[in-house]
Image: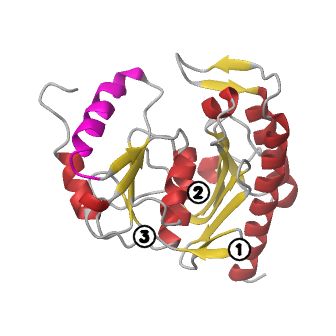
Amino acid sequence: MSAHAELDRVEATAIALALDAGRLIRDQVGRHTTVEFKGEIDLVTEVDKASEALIANGISAAWPGHALLGEEGSTTGVPVEHAEWVWIVDPIDGTTNFAHGYPHFAVSIAIARGGVGEIGVVYDPSRDELFVGRRGQGSRCNGHPIAVSKTAALGRAILATGFSYDRAYRHRQIAQWISLHDHCQGIRREGSAALGVTWLAAGRTDGFYEAPINPWDIAAGAVIAEAAGARVTSLGGQDYAIFDREILVTNGLIHTELQQALADSLPVGVP
């Protein structure tokens, strides 16, 4: 099998699993949901676990040599550190939204080969929007090509971000939020990094930043955004890697300006 044909098959599997998981999640919206807490404010539901199990079983059946890094700990039995192919999965990105009936959450699936993100799939079951991107080959939403915005100045830009589940980081993040509001048109915080980054890929926002953040929250979105023309780096401008725990994504035109504004955004005394 050629490398291109193999990627086609892997992408088709990822799309099918994202849609199946999305249907499972959508069927449970508004129903009684058992909620457990992994941290003080970080929660998980039985629907997260069922969604991830569905995806894990699908990967094992279709691609038995592939590994899985999943938020809820599911595995294909293949060690991540020994695998050429790794699936990085958030079965519900935006669990808090889902648990509260707030319709902004997604299934996020990235596939990396040799440590490089090759395919990103993000499915929003509330809006029935399927975002798919492949490294170097563009991105699309429901089959239609998407591209980043052409906003050329930070002062005209809409940004998006998220706040950590670890309260220790929130003073810093709120200080950045307040400071950046003086430099842009506005900042959105909707509670799903996967959608935050893919919406940037579709030109709906102009910049996204967050730190710290888990790889499964952003890996798929990063592939989709970069394939749609975005610039993706660390907050300091270093090359983004698929397992990084921070990210800065822009349309490219405001990247340097936003990076500098972030560097200048913390008042003295904020940890």
At 59% from the left and 49% from the top, the residue drawn is 81
Residue at the disc numbered 1: 143
Residues 234 and 25: in front is 25
Mark closest to the chain's N terminus, 2 or 3: 3
Residue 245: image quadrant is: top left
Q: Secondary structure at mark 3?
A: loop
- Magenta part of the chain: 167-184
- For discs 2 and 1, the disc positioned in front in the rendered view: 1
Apparent side of residue 19 relative to residue 111 in the rendered image (left or right)? right
Asked where in the image residue 113 lies, by quadrant, the reply is bottom right
The residue furthest left is 268
Q: x, y (%) of residue 140?
A: 63, 72
Magenta span main SS: helix
**Residue 245 versus residue 184 in the image, above or below:** above
The residue wearing badge 3 is 149
Let me know if residue 216 is in the magenta part: no
Q: Position of residue 187 (x, y in %)?
A: 37, 46
- Residue under the image location 61 percent in, 69 percent down: 133
Q: Is residue 254 left or right of residue 118?
A: left
How far is mark 2 from mark 3, CA to CA?
19 Å
- Which quadrant is the N terminus positioned in? bottom right
Regarding residue 247, the answer to whether it shows in the image is no
Circle number at residue 220: 2
- What percent of the width, then of the height, locates residue 87? 67, 54
The Cα atoms of the two marked residues, 1 and 3, are separated by 19 Å
For the residues bearing labels 2 and 1, Cβ distance under 8 angstroms: no
